[in-house]
Image: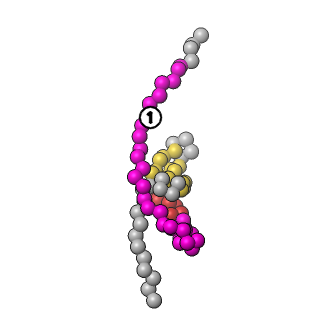
Amino acid sequence: MNQQTTEMSFQLLIEEDKIQGDFIGYIPALRLGVQGDSLEEVRVNAADLLQMEIESRLQMGKSLPSDNTATMERLTISVPLPVEK
């Protein structure tokens, strides 16, 4: 018997961490984060984690999440500079 499947899509935010020399991925709809040494590794790690999360929810009888429409915004603040002596 063939098991039915469905495709689900979620936003993945990827940020390069130049200090650590790696990449961080974040799936806002599920508040899941992953790390990888390359963009491809972050994508693979995110897909694996997402798969595990969805399968876990199904096994526990929880509802399946839907993607959200996360918004990326830029915040600007004023910061006082130290006074030079």
Q: Position of residue 38 (x, y in %)?
A: 49, 54
Considering every residue shown, the one lying at the far bottom of the view is: 1
Which residue occupies 47% across, 28% down? 77
Position of 57 relative to 73 (above/below): below
Q: Can residue 70 be seen in this view?
A: yes
The residue tagged 1 is: 75
Q: Position of residue 80 (x, y in %)?
A: 53, 20
Which residue occupies 53% across, 54% down? 31
Please, what is the three-letter code of the amino acid marked with disc 1? Leu
**Closer-to-camera residue (42/65):** 65
Q: Where is residue 64 in the image (x, y as percent from the top left)?
A: 48, 66
**Closer-to-camera residue (52/61):** 61
Position of 62 relative to 26 (above/below): below
Q: Is residue 48 visible?
A: no
Secondary-structure class at tag 1: loop
Give the magenta-colored segment's residue range: 52-81
Quadrant (top left, top right, bottom left, bottom right) of the C terminus = top right
Does 68 sit left or right of 33 as displayed? left
Image quadrant assignment for residue 52 = bottom right
Which residue occupies 47% across, 63% down? 65
